[in-house]
Amino acid sequence: MENKNILIHCCCAHCAAYTVKYWQEQGYATTAFWYNPNINPYMEHQNRLEAMKTLSQNMNFELVVADSYDFVEYFRRVVGHEAERCALCFDMRMSKTAETAIELGIGNFTSTLLISHQQKHDLLKEMGENISQTTGVNFMYADLRKRYSDSRCITKPMALYRQQYCGCVYSEWERYTNKTIE
Ligand code: SF4
């Protein structure tokens, strides 16, 4: 029988709102998972986490927060490979999600990153499928990019903290300079 549980890696409250709703509507018991060692500096990470906690309370879904922030490990992996940092970042976050799904006895995983137009969507899909093969946890793919505005409709009345850049310090620099790290 199909396991109708899903662990949803959440990058932020604004991407999570509709994504969680979508999987609930597909009949899945949802658990949200917070693990974002890429978000720097620390207080930016905390602001986004607080917004996520408020969303989970307001929408009444379970949120599991990883017990480690691991930002040092994130930088160890990325420094010297900045141009490929998104692949390393996706791998770190989604691998941890799949590992946590195994610990929690959940058979499926996905990421709210799939609702964002800002992310490398095809790379996310490919990496999710690779991690699924390695771990044995099903990667649940859905292209929700056309529903991001629905997600914002849910979070707007909540007046949650909303970030201005993807997460890492490199993306902050790119956001405010309109330049790209190569
Ligand atoms: S730009 Fe975003 S996805 Fe890419 S490494 Fe930075 S935080 Fe991760």
Image (spheres, rainbow, N blue to C red):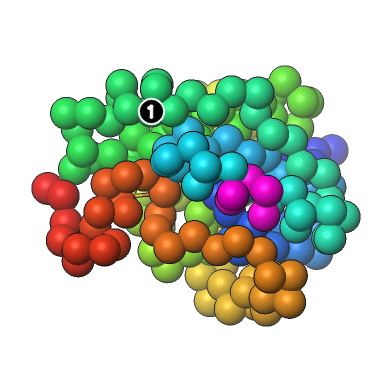
Residue at the spot x=74%, y=70% of the render?
158
Whether residue 49 is in magenta: the answer is yes
Residue where numbered disc 1 is placed: 74
Q: Is residue 165 above or below residue 170?
A: below
In the rendered structure, which segment of residues is drawn in magenta?
Answer: 47-51
Quadrant of the drawing holding the N terminus: top right
> Relative to residue 156, is residue 127 depicted above or below?
above
Residue flagged by tag 1: what amino acid is it? Tyr
Dot 1: what SS?
A: helix
Q: Is residue 105 part of the magenta span, yes or no?
A: no
For the point 42% across and 68% down, the residue is: 117
Residue 109 in the image: x percent, y percent? Answer: 64, 41
Q: Position of residue 137 (x, y in %)?
A: 63, 31
Dominant secondary structure, magenta: helix
The reply, left or right, for residue 67 in relation to residue 113 is right
Residue at image x 65%, y 29%? 66
- Left or right: 137 in relation to 45: right
Q: Vertically, is 8 above or below 95?
A: below
**Can you give x and y, in whole percent of width and height, for residue 11 in the image?**
55, 49
Q: Is residue 75 visible?
A: yes
Q: Quadrant of residue 92?
A: top left
Q: How many marks?
A: 1
Residue 169 x %, y %: 32, 45
Q: Which of the two residues, 33 or 44, is positioned nearer the viewer here?
A: 44
